[in-house]
């Protein structure tokens, strides 16, 4: 496996609280100068939400299994409240025991923002664990790229934006009700 000593050593340290980090697109562009074409293709296929069928990367395969399990557990909890069958929305994959507990903890929170934060923090912990033992290889870069995507996702959540979205939804609902009266 190719080692990317220079590339990894130039990357800033990331924490879940990091703000103003490198954009994921800039990271991919930077890596394009140093990675083999095959490794660049694998890295650019990494996504928090879209999982490749079969990946040559252990970190990416593990991420896909873990995230799919977490999402399936969330479906199991949310579906009954919506009056739908969970199986309709579940994706094939193995159940990972810790996913059920994480999903229950998030589901128990009153605030959607708090639940998303809890889920993202658990995602971060999972990625930290995938990074262990990988210091200058493609697996390290894959985890780093997924973390950048997670931080970018986290940036989109804000109390002010949530209040604005709520106000818009409330206005739409009340406007529709007034029209129907």
Image (tube, rainbow, N blue to C red):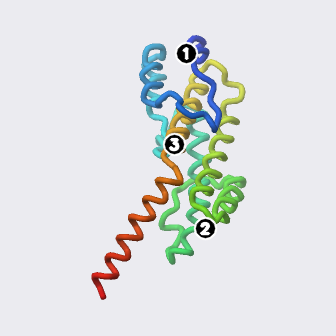
Residue carrying label 3: 155
Q: Position of residue 144 (x, y in %)?
A: 57, 29
Question: What residue appears at the point 71 percent right and 58 percent down from the top-left corner?
Answer: 101
What is the C-alpha distance between the residues marked 1 and 3?
A: 25 Å
Q: Position of residue 27 (x, y in %)?
A: 47, 25
In the rendered structure, which disc, 2 or 1, sits on the residue that comes first in sequence? 1
Do the residues bearing badges 3 and 2 touch, measured as CB atoms within 8 Å?
no
Crowd tier of the residue under label 3, counting other residues whose Cα lies within 10 Å: few below 14, some 14–19, many 20 or above: few
Residue 122 got which mark? Answer: none
Q: Position of residue 146 (x, y in %)?
A: 54, 35
Is the residue 132 above or below the residue 54 in the image? above
Q: Secondary structure at mark 2?
A: helix
Left/right placement of residue 39 relative to residue 133 reads: left
Residue 7 got which mark? Answer: 1
Residue 77 got which mark? Answer: 2
Seen as rendered, the residue at the extreme bottom is 181
Crowd tier of the residue under label 2, counting other residues whose Cα lies within 10 Å: few below 14, some 14–19, many 20 or above: some
Q: Secondary structure at mark 1?
A: helix
What is the C-alpha distance between the residues marked 2 and 1?
A: 42 Å
What is the C-alpha distance between the residues marked 3 and 2?
A: 26 Å
Left/right placement of residue 104 relative to residue 1 reads: right
Q: In front: 89, or 126?
A: 126
Question: Can you tell which of label 3 and label 2 is closer to the viewer?
Answer: 3
Question: What residue appears at the point 61 percent right and 15 percent down from the top-left corner?
Answer: 9
Q: Secondary structure at mark 3?
A: helix
Question: Can you tell which of label 1 and label 3 is closer to the viewer?
Answer: 3
Viewer can see residue 40: yes
Q: Position of residue 43 (x, y in %)?
A: 48, 28
Is the residue 149 above or below the residue 65 in the image? above
């Amino acid at each position: 496996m190719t080692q990317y000593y220079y590339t990894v050593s130039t990357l800033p340290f990331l924490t879940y609280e990091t703000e103003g980090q490198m954009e994921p697109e800039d990271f991919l562009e930077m890596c394009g100068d140093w990675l083999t074409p095959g490794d660049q293709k694998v890295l650019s296929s990494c996504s928090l939400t879209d999982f490749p069928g079969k990946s040559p990367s252990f970190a990416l395969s593990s991420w896909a299994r873990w995230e799919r399990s977490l999402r399936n557990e969330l479906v199991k909890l949310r579906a009954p409240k919506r009056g739908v069958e969970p199986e309709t929305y579940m994706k094939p994959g193995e159940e990972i025991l810790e996913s059920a507990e994480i999903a229950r903890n998030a589901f128990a929170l009153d605030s959607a923002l708090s639940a998303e934060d809890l889920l993202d923090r658990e995602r971060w912990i999972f990625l930290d664990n995938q990074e262990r033992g990988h210091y200058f290889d493609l697996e390290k870069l894959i985890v780093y790229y997924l973390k950048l995507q997670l931080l970018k996702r986290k940036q989109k959540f804000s109390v002010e934006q949530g209040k604005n979205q709520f106000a818009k939804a409330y206005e739409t609902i009340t406007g529709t009700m007034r029209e129907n009266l």
